[in-house]
Amino acid sequence: MAPHEGAVVGTRVVHRRYVPYSHAHYAGSLVDGAYSLGLFGDVATEMCIRTDGDEGLFASYSDVQFRAPVRAGDVLEITCELTRVGTRSRVMDFAVYVVARGAATEAAPGAAEVLAEPLLATSATGTVVVPG
């Protein structure tokens, strides 16, 4: 998709991100839920740049669901799909999928594996506004 093509329902943006161990906040190398929300902001920003030539501003989230843990050592795929286009508002559906996970042991501290099926960790709907 060429930049500044205009806001079209069905437009998708996908990012991939490795979760560093420095982001673990809880036992079991768990990462807080705000981590996923920050990633949603990143894909929404790219969506707005592509569709409107502006970074946009997040107005709200709805239906945020934390479905599975995100852990340090995970490789995440973050998706954003434009679902509704208003005059200045853009509604997007977001998802964070775990596509690979660290599998470290004492004998193999850097071990990791690609998951057979991506694991849906977080989903949400968000509204972003862009200049009129």
Image (cartoon, grey):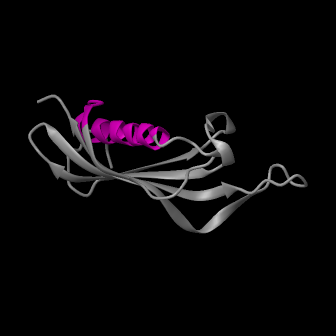
As drawn, 23 above or below 9: above
Residue 58 lies within the magenta run: yes
Expressed as whole percent of the image width and height from the top left, the position of residue 112 reads: 73, 56
Residue 49 vs 71, above or below: the answer is above
Please give the name of the residue rendered at 61% of the width and 48% of the height, measured from the top-left corner.
71
Residue 33 belongs to the span the image colors magenta: no
Residue 98: x %, y % from top left: 55, 57
Q: Residue furthest left?
A: 87
Above/below status of 29 relative to 118: above
Q: How many marks?
A: 0
Q: Looking at the image, which residue sits at the far right?
A: 107
Question: In x, y percent, where is residue 22?
Answer: 66, 33
Magenta part of the chain = 34-59
Residue 9 appears left or right of 121: left
Question: Along the horizontal axis of the image, is 66 left or right of 22?
Answer: left
As drawn, the residue found furthest toward the bottom would be: 116
**Residue lying farthest to the front in this orientation:** 27
Q: In the image, what residue occupies the spot 34% across and 36% down?
A: 45
Location of the C terminus by quadrant is: top left
Q: Name the residue rendered at 49%, 39% in the picture.
A: 35
**Residue 65 quadrant:** bottom left
Label the magenta part by its dominant secondary structure: helix
Q: Nearer the viewer, residue 75 or 49?
A: 75
Quadrant of the image occupied by residue 67: bottom left
At x 86% / y 54%, what residue is drawn?
108
Q: Is residue 126 visible?
A: yes
Whether residue 89 sits left or right of residue 100 in the image: it is left
Is residue 72 visible to us here? no
Percent position of residue 86, x then y: 11, 44
